Amino acid sequence: MIDPVLLREDPDVIRRSQEARGESVALVDDALAADVQRRAAITAFEALRAEQNQFGKRVATAPKDEKKQLVAEAQQLAAQVKDAQQAAAEAESRFGEAIRRLGNPVIEGVPAGGEENFVTLRTVGEKPSFDFEPRDHLEIGEALDAIDMARGAKVSGARFYFLKGVGARLELALMNYALDTALAAGFTPLITPTLVKPEIMQGTGFLGAHADEIYHLPADDLYLTGTSEVALAGYHADEILDLSAGPLRYAGWSTCYRREAGSGGKDTRGIIRVHQFNKLEMFVYTLPEEAEAEHERLVGWQEQMLGSLELAYRVIDVAAGDLGSSAARKFDIEAWVPTQDAYRELTSTSNCTTFQARRLETRYRTESGKTAPVATLNGTLATTRWLVAILETHQQADGSVVVPEALRPYLGGLERLEPVA
């Protein structure tokens, strides 16, 4: 949720953000009108309640012969107060609905436009070259007996898979390496729930335009999470945090589930776009004024991981229309996938400013003693999709794959993955 004070005092900031996102600017005026109605209804209710309190004192001290008439008037006034209270609650609800339709105001400098309007900030590493026809990750994985799509489909349907043997070991090695990286950076590890309540999913901003991506269990009214960001954002809901010693940093390890609605026919081969995968997600609670610097630190840890795995990648500043409602800025890191002759997203990291914290009532105490919303940030540190870039980048002519040196300690010193005869 955006800051109601910002909406009221500088609505043009919100209008410009909506325009950059390619979303309705008229929603700003709707929210402003709802705010006026809300405040008027609250004022009317509070005035009637004050009148009721004063009238109650008058009744208490009135002579006995006047009390009967005054009590009748008090009952009428009580009914008016009750109606005014109901009107104020309804106006508050309408305002909440109106303001929740607005995306987080984008940070100055975020490129306007849609998915294709990103800005490349830097390109790192040399794209691999081969003196043989490179195989794609699925062909490599099948030769290693590491990926089994056919049995995944047999058991669960399209876009499911088994990681087997060295495939399973490679993913666990990657995740444990990422966990050690997070620990060295001061993150507290959490293994998170993957089913969450509607208010937590709503609070993180995932039940908006992309709600069709989420699995819902109606019988339990719970949602399967597509990222541990959701559970991590809810971890400190309705709490006042002590940030005097610095940010609170968590690394959430979880299985993730996505319906991939609307992606029919897209990336159907292999494990690039699947319904279930594992991920280690960084999540940070920090002071709002520290959020942009923390965002850069998150990107730095992601680049450290990708560089150590000897992958060529680029960092992009995602355009406003591709941010999602909760992010004010998002940097993606895309690794080079040789057989696709393209960069493909491996990590995202988002600065959600105070948007999620306002919805989830996560606050800190200011120097004046008052409470204010914290800022939240999130970023991927490793996920199943990374195997695509690792296998394709480090493949050899004989079908083997050289294990990046950084991963070898997590594979018992294994230096090469060999095809199965």
Image (cartoon, rainbow, N blue to C red):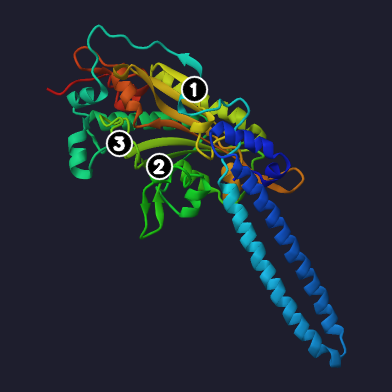
- The three-letter code of the residue at mark 1 reads Ile
For mark 3, what is the residue? 264
In front: 143, or 249? 143
For mark 2, what is the residue? 226
- The three-letter code of the residue at mark 3 reads Gly
Q: Viewer-nearest of labels 2 and 3?
A: 3
Q: Is residue 361 left or right of residue 177?
A: right
Q: Viewer-nearest of labels 1 and 3?
A: 3
- The three-letter code of the residue at mark 2 reads Gly
| Disc 1 crowd, CA 10 A, few/some/many (<14, 14-19, 20+) | some
| Disc 2 crowd, CA 10 A, few/some/many (<14, 14-19, 20+) | many
Residue 355: x and y, percent? Answer: 59, 42
Q: Assign a secondary structure to mark 1.
A: strand
Mark found first going from the N terminus, 2 or 1: 2
- Residue lying at the far left in this picture: please name it: 421
Which image quarter: residue 192?
Answer: top left
Residue 297: x and y, percent? Answer: 55, 26
Query: If the image is split into quadrants, where does the C terminus sit?
Result: top left
Q: Assign a secondary structure to mark 3.
A: loop
State the separation of the CA atoms marked 2 and 3. Answer: 18 Å
Please report contact status of discs 2 and 1: CB closer than 8 Å, yes or no.
no
In front: 103, or 305? 103
Tell me if residue 240 can be seen. Answer: yes
For mark 1, what is the residue? 316
